[in-house]
Amino acid sequence: MTLHIPPSLKHKKFFYLWLGQLISITGTQMQIWALFWHINQLNENPIALGGIGLARILPVIIFSLIGGALADSTNRRNVLFFTQSSAALLALALGLLTQFGSITIWHIYALTALQAVAVAFDGPARQALIPNLVPQKDLPNAFSMTFTSFQIGSVLGPALTGFVIAFAGQEAVYYFNAISFVAVLFALVMIGDVPQKFAEKAAGVSVQSIREGIRFILSKPIILSSMLLDFVATFFASANTLMPIIAKDVLNVGVVEYGYLSAAQAVGAVIAALVISQVKELRRQGQLFIVSVVVFGLATILFGGTSFFVVAWCALAATGAADAVSTIIRNTIRQLQTPDYIRGRMTSVNQIFFQGGPQLGEIEAGTVAQLFGAPFAVISGGIGCIVGLFLIVWKWPQLTHYNGDEPSLAGVPAD
């Protein structure tokens, strides 16, 4: 198979955003995994790791719908300027508190919650901006490349985390993350003005506009079922927060190996995403989506049941590859089946599911691990993922019949 430049990267504005995100995501992923390790150093109880999930999800639940309405009624590029700058300052605060020995677990929770507020506004604006940067025919490829940039950053970030902590200290990770946001800010400058459609009847950020977004989701079974499946899979099979415990107590490895383990999912995801980026058209997308979630659950069970580092790493890589396939398909479904004027609000509802699953899953995993041990929490989560999948498919069988060539609503104007 001859490799080719992905078509979405041939569009300058998208390329600038893609490259900026790649750099920024590397810093963000370094911080995420460093926080897990940092919290475990401050408090070894598994429930303490679950607390980071609570700190992240509450702002998302509270502010995401507002963020979606804002993305549909305000210039999305301007929203990103504000959210990226805010996140950079909060990362800098984490670094300063750590360097001067003033950091406590409550500081970490509070600053993480504030960063989650920025994410609640950033996510809908950023996701809704992408279809404004590429033509409709290149949109699936754009989401494939967006996912690829996320996963490349997720490989580099965790892999670097262990080395940076070991040789430069915990605070160095937070400083690197703060600097990495400059890449996205520079990309936004290079992009310039981006035209977008606004609903003629939009009332700005209002209860009416938020309700309109929710009603739209409820009227689209294919979108609603994909969101629910995303939530259920990541809620039960989210093992990330338990990684420090698994690494130290089950696999008996140190911080450098912990970094390698943390990068495993992203390695698998990058490989899968790059393969998909070379496929011109994906067919039978619904069936492929379902199979990928089954593989995700089975690989999670294998990860929880092994005490061998190599097997654990390969199992995590398999979960990453499966998640890459499902993420690309579900994002494409949602964006192609959503008109531009309401895309920010659709994305904000999706963000609650997308963020809520893993973050609430961290609380669930920490609680179960506290009661029954980390391996049991991971294995039972993998089983719950598969059971939840079959229940959702039974309720919404439309997902199994989705092919990928259905009529698009992306260019439908507002009423």
Image (tube, rainbow, N blue to C red):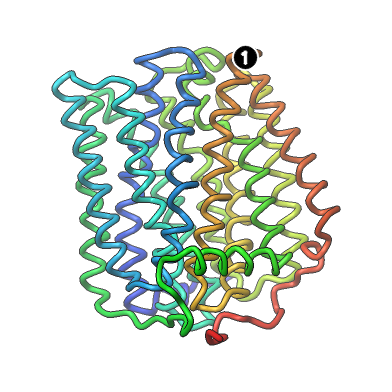
Q: Position of residue 261 (x, y in %)?
A: 48, 31
Comparing 136 with 214, the one in front is 214
- Residue 381 percent coordinates (x, y): 68, 31
Q: Quadrant of the N terminus?
A: bottom right
User: What residue is shown with label 1?
Assistant: 373
Q: Secondary structure at mark 1?
A: loop
Q: Residue at x 33, y 33 (%)?
A: 161
In the figure, is residue 134 to the left or right of 358? left
Q: Residues within 10 Å of mark 1 (few under 14, many from 20)?
A: some
- Taking the spot 20% from the left edge, 44% from the top edge, the residue there is 89
- Depth check, front residue: 76 or 291: 76
Q: Residue at x 48, y 81 (%)?
A: 201
Q: Residue at x 44, y 65 (%)?
A: 206
**Residue type marked 1:** Gly
Q: Is residue 167 above or below residue 274?
A: above
Residue placed most toward the observer, 230 or 220: 220
